Image (spheres, rainbow, N blue to C red):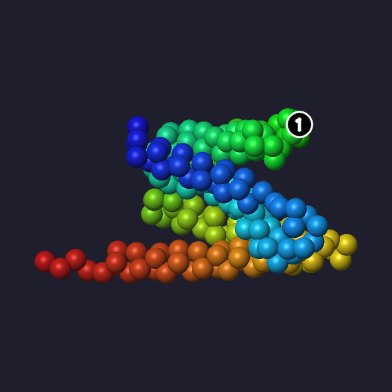
Amino acid sequence: MDKRGWILGMAAALALALLSLLTSITSEAQLTGEADTLLTTRLSVNKLLNTGTAWAGLPILAGWMVRRPLGAAAIGVVSCLTALVTHYGLGQVVGIFEPEIWASNRYWFAFALVLGAPLGLVGSLAHRAGVLGLLARLTAPLGATLEPFVLQMFAQPDYISWPGRVSTAVCGALLLAGGIVGVVLVAVRERRRRAQSLRPVQK
């Protein structure tokens, strides 16, 4: 077993869970509208940490760190479950979440059990050359690029308060920018790899 990969993968799971929880903490000033700028900033970070890209990217990253297919599939599931249990468990302990949070979010645990292993394998495949490896490396950045449009982050209804609308748009812009940068980096590295493979071997 790749112990270092497991340690790094679990560290990533805990980091996502804790950062997502910490950015959920609000203040009375934010609730009463006296600190809308701070509220907008907090919501932007919190929404970014709770995107599908971030939570789907966790098992991909963990699988990439472990590398071997079986281990990558395993840590894909374990990292997701660890992040969820840590997030909701600590949130309940500090009083952010009510006990009902577990039942109301049980579908996330189901998603972790069903999708964690395949996403972990995507991370493992990202180390490979060829079409499968390329597609695996593009999975996360393409997901980040598409998510803002699928969830209509740039077209929020007017009845949502302006901090809510602005923070959603900021989150979408960050996802889009990060996704485009990711796609470009993958494309550049793939082009360099192919150029090196075609370069004649010097005797």
Q: Between residues 183 and 58, which one lies in front from this camera angle? A: 58
Closer-to-camera residue (196/34): 34
Residue at the extreme right: 159
Left or right, 95 with respect to 66, comes to right
Query: How far from the left and from the top, in percent, is residue 198?
Result: 29, 67
The quarter holding residue 17 reads: top right
Residue 35 lies, with reference to residue 84, above or below; the image says below
Q: Closest to the observer: 31 or 189?
A: 31
Q: Position of residue 27 (x, y in %)?
A: 71, 53
Vertical order, 75 against 175 (above or below) = above
Residue at 50% over, 64% down: 182
From the image, tell me which residue sits under label 1.
100
Q: Image height check: is 86 above or below 27?
A: above
- The kind of residue tagged 1 is Glu
- Quadrant for the C terminus, please: bottom left
State the image coordinates of residue 179 (x, y, percent, origin top left): 56, 64
Left or right: where does residue 84 sit relative to residue 186?
right
Q: Quadrant of the N terminus?
A: top left
Q: x%, y% of residue 103? A: 74, 30
Using the rendered image of the protein, determine whether residue 95 is visible from the camera's viewpoint. yes
